[in-house]
Amino acid sequence: MKEIPALEEQKKQKESLHPSISLEAEEVCSFLKLKRSRSKFIQVGEKLEAINRQLKDIQILKQQAANIGRLQKEIERAKQEVSQLESSLLATGSTKTAEDVQNEISQLTAEL
């Protein structure tokens, strides 16, 4: 990067000596500037790709978190429903729990 100012200074000095040398120096300076710009462009592209990968990972995690939250709510609703059903069974005088009823259903299904 320090090369460019040094080359420009050399260009000025040699301009007075020979006009073709100044054109060559100008071309070299232009080439070095383009090379530096290309290098920065590549670095920016690589950073952009890394950011895009991270964004995809974040979106996946966001979807998973939403699914977990939804499933937790469903579990809580199911627990409340089971508790209400057990309370209803106790109110009617039944001593069976939801697990007892499920076992009976499983046995009947197996017999069929």
Image: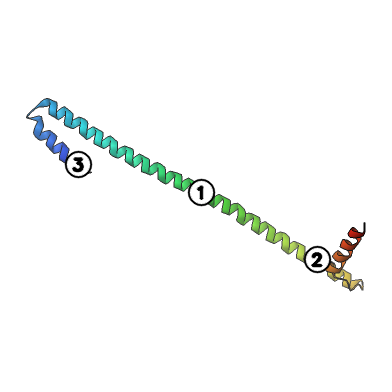
Q: Give whichever of discs 2 and 1 has the lower sequence position.
A: 1
The reply to whether callout 3 and callout 1 are in contact (CB within 8 Å) is no
Q: Amino acid at mark 1?
A: Leu
* First along the sequence among labels 3 and 1: 3
What amino acid does circle 3 point to?
Glu
- Is the residue 46 above or below the residue 25 in the image? below
Above or below, 77 against 59 in this view is: below
- Is disc 2 surrounded by few (<14), some (14 to 19) or many (20+) residues within 10 Å? some
The N terminus lies in which quarter of the figure? top left
Helix, strand, or loop for circle 2?
A: helix
Q: Is residue 109 above or below residue 1?
A: below
Question: Could you tell whether 45 is left or right of 21 in the image?
Answer: right
x then y, percent, for residue 3: 19, 41
Figure quadrant of residue 42: top left
Q: Name which residue lies at 11% across and 26% down.
A: 19
How far apart are the two marked residues, 3 and 2, measured between alpha carbons?
A: 78 Å
Residue at image mark 3: 3
Element type at mark 3: helix
Q: Is residue 11 left or right of residue 53?
A: left
**N-terminal of the two: label 3 or label 2?**
3
For mark 2, what is the residue? Answer: 82
Amino acid type indicated by mark 2: Val
Q: Quadrant of residue 71?
A: bottom right
Q: CA distance from mark 2 to mark 1?
A: 41 Å
Residue under the point 85% across and 64% down: 102
- Is 103 drawn above or below residue 28 in the view shown? below
Colouring scheme, one of rainbow, by chain, secondary structure, one colour: rainbow
Helix, strand or loop at label 1? It is helix
Residue position for label 1: 55
